[in-house]
Amino acid sequence: MSNSKFGISFNPMLCFFISCVPLIFLSESFTQRTLQLCEGVLKLLSIWFCEKFSKFLVSRFQKSRIPLSFVQIPMTLVLKKMALCSTRVENVEENERISLLDLPELTLECIFERLSPAGLCSMAGVCSSLRERCTSDHLWEIHLKQKWGKVIGDTAYQEWQCQVASRNGPSLSGQDKKKGLFESLLSSRPFSWITPKLEKSCKVRTTLPVDSIMAWYLSLESGNFWFPAQVYNRENGHIGFMLSCYDALLCYNSETDNFHARYSSHGRRTLEENIGWDRLRAPPVNTPPFVLHVSDCLPDLKPGDYIEIQWRRNKEFPYGWWYGHVDHLEPCDGNETLCRCHYSDTVVLKFNQYSSESRWRRTLINRKDHREEGNEVDGFYGGIRKLYKEEEIARWKHFWPAQVLEQ
């Protein structure tokens, strides 16, 4: 934009800066160092203005045919002063550079929240101040929920706390105790590339609180912590475990991005490898695998409801959770307006993954007095969970077998 009367050209950036100056100085998050930098910017801006104004004067003198010799000496002095001032401002900028820690607190938090776990680990090795920020629990809780939230629950956290308290875990034994938890976890394969950066920063404290969220996250990632969870279709989808979910201890393999599992059954441990994320879940209830679950949904069960029920081969085996649904009693034709099945004390559970001739196709339970029921031939049925969430039901259907099970 220009003024035709005086021939002065205005820079849009200059107008924007002038309009923003009051807002900048009113900001509560402005630091003293930032004010000093702004002072330098204003000095540069004044030099720029003097240069523009001097050029304007020269052009006006030329147009007015006034001898230039009258202004040559003042102009020379102005230019010398401009050069001297410019040198001083450059020195100020070189000596007073802004560091990351000089940014406002809110800005720093936004930066740290957008860093990956590896980025936070790298930043923690820079200095003690960044280390304290980058190892804080609230930052690592975000990453823990995003990656591990669907496979770890309260049981896994309690197990982790017990391991920390007893100091018998793999990550805290032997030489790792001397090195400190932070170094021992980062020396594992997924984080080995971070270790040289820590060695260069000898002043950085290398001990990490063993009960911190970061320590827990790194233990999960490195495979140093076997955590309790549940596995759908155990033993690579063995026909004897189709549409079931069993408790296991799991260990993560970061190279293959899958898990190893250890199942406990009949006094021996069964191992399974290459388990994908989609086959895992956090235990929905805090009921140990050898304990009967207390069913609180029995009064509400009606035909069409989807359920999980505990079942085990014999009383020496742990329970697994099996998928089924509530069916109508035999006299009922399924007419919704005439159905009275939900008033009966007898509840029919049906498992459509099995053929109609299978002894596991249907079973009956007592709504008012349900306990573990069964025998050594058909197995034992335990507690029941009603499935209310569509997400849970859809996940069970995802594992539906390609053909009916003939057992």
Image (spheres, rainbow, N blue to C red):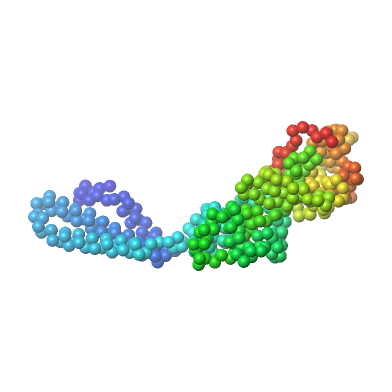
At x 72%, y 56%, the residue is 155
In front here: 3 or 132?
Answer: 132
Farthest front residue in view: 175
Quadrant the C terminus occupies: top right
Query: What residue sits 62% from the left and 66% below the top?
Result: 178
Q: Is residue 134 above or below residue 251?
A: below
Q: Whole-percent x and y of residue 146?
A: 61, 51
- Name which residue lies at 80% across and 35% down: 405
Question: With 237 as the anchor, is 9 left or right in this view?
Answer: left
Residue drawn at the location 74% of the way across and 37% of the way down: 400
Along the line of sight, which residue is nearer the eye, 263 or 400? 263
Left or right of 113, for residue 391: right
Tell me if I can see residue 387 in this picture.
Answer: no
Res 286 quadrant in image: bottom right
Q: Give the percent coordinates (x, y) of residue 320.
A: 79, 47
Q: Position of residue 303 (x, y in %)?
A: 81, 39
Q: Nearer the viewer, residue 38 or 207?
A: 207
Front-most of residues 74 and 406: 406
Q: Is residue 288 visible?
A: yes
Residue 37 falls left or right of residue 179:
left
Residue 72: where, in percent of width, then height? 13, 58
**Figure disc tally:** 0
